[in-house]
Image: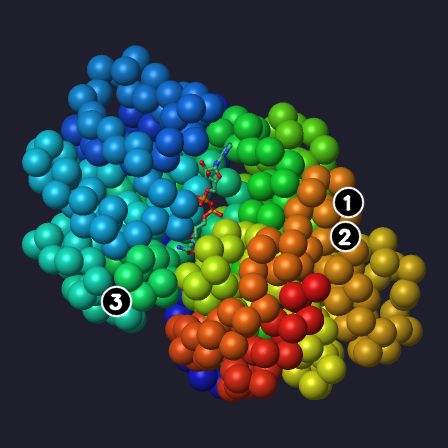
Amino acid sequence: MSTAFEFHCPTKIVCGKHALEKLPDELVMTGMSHPLVMTDAGLMKLGVAAKLTDVLDAADVTYDLFSDVPPDSSMDVVNQVAHLYVEKGCDGFVAIGGGSVIDTTKGAAASLACNGVDFATLQGSEILTDNLPPFIAVPTTAGTGSEVTLVAVVKDTQTHAKLSFTSYKLLPHVAILDPALTASLPPKLTSTTGMDALTHAIEAYTSTQKNPVSDAFAVKAIELIASNLTTACTTPDNLDARTNLALGSLMAGAAFSNAMVGIVHSLGHSLGGLCGIPHGQAMMMLLPHCVRYNLKHGIHAGEYGKLLPYLAPAKAEELGHQASKEVLDQAVCDTLFAMNTYFHDNFGAPLTLKDLGVKHEDLPAVAKQARYDGSALYNSVEVTLEMAQEILEAVYE
Ligand code: NAD
């Protein structure tokens, strides 16, 4: 490695069984006395958000609640939350939820850091100059890693585009990972969000901006996700598997937050924005097809195979040290397809765009928008219209 690189992960991590009990201490450490608690309707209904507000109630903490974050969120909601925060006199955020809740909170916090400007004006890279208000993220999915990423992805409901915001200022100050909060995640959502995390790690490992530190986080993330995802799906309340999956997701987030992602995310964001496909679902479907496309065109040849010992250790052992790079690359691709088939057959995770109701005539627009997604900048080759179309056709049915 000849060029200098940076690696940022200043977020304090509190992880393990009963980690949520540390929340009152973390409020004091971050200087919060009246947080705005952010969550969504699903987590309210399931009683997951109540696990957090119960801790606040027991500690006599004054707080306000916003529980209407929609899936994938939107600019309007971000701006609405920023207004509510000022109106209620809050002095920090506690976000309990998946990537949608955490990213909405990032957006509102960023807007407030810039005197309440419309969040849309902060789109792009390193636009933020001021620090966010105190911010504690409590993830309830093990997928996006948003609790440690410098990214926020928010939908523009007018243009149907998913807009990316990147800044080192967007990193939450504290992440609390308590496995009991992910135990209610149904197997299908566990598998799709887990495959999102796996995609982060694999794309970080093959990104143009990778470095030895992001590689270390990526391979450990792959090992943790691959060896715990099935267990978390089949025995949802196995808290050891849930903890390992949460850590794998966090490490994959830290890896991609520094190394960035590529074609899988370019296409996935476009499918999310134009066709409403949930992010994890899109990642799961696209990942093996993008790996297959890349290998067919000699992209990352010899690189994917290095991941086999972490992704499928038994397969790596079976193939042995004599296996060629081509054989190892192919084994990684085959393993990813086999994982998807398993999650489809056992938990109903869809495998094709057609299954999800995407219209074939929408594919050209999806391909076109994918080329202009921020992730395309970090793909090791230019994302062309032909490339995007070929992959989308393969995932279609
Ligand atoms: P999500 O936050 O959209 O949640 C999906 C559904 O799962 C919701 O209905 C929610 O109520 C439910 N849910 C969440 N936790 C649950 C639990 N413990 N039990 C039962 N149900 C639960 O899903 P996500 O995949 O975590 O986040 C997706 C969003 O994050 C997308 O907008 C995506 O673009 C974004 N994203 C952001 C980053 C980043 O670094 N900022 C990275 C990847 C994706």
Q: Quadrant of residue 51?
A: top left
Q: Quadrant of residue 373?
A: bottom left
Q: Nearer the viewer, mark 1 or mark 3?
A: 1
Amino acid type, mark 1: Asp
Label 2 within 8 A of ligand 1 by Cβ: no
Q: Residues within 10 Å of mark 3 (few under 14, many from 20)?
A: some
Sequence order check, earlier mark of 1 and 3: 3
CA separation in Å, label 1 and label 2: 6 Å
User: Residue at the location (14% across, 38% down)?
Assistant: 84
Inspect this view and state whether residue 375 appears: yes
Q: Nearer the viewer, mark 3 or mark 2?
A: 2
User: Residue at the location (46% across, 55% down)?
Assistant: 276
Sequence order check, earlier mark of 3 and 2: 3
Inspect this view and state whether residue 28 appears: no
Amino acid type, mark 3: Gln
Q: Which residue is mark 1?
A: 345
**Rendering coords of residue 220 (x, y %):** 62, 54
Q: Which residue is mark 2?
A: 341
State whether residue 379 is above or below residue 131.
Answer: below
Disc 1, SS:
helix
**Rendering coords of residue 72 (x, y %):** 39, 50
Disc 3, SS:
loop
Q: Residues within 10 Å of mark 1 (few under 14, many from 20)?
A: few
Q: Which residue is mark 3?
A: 123
Amino acid type, mark 2: Thr
Give the quarter of the figure containing the C terminus: bottom right
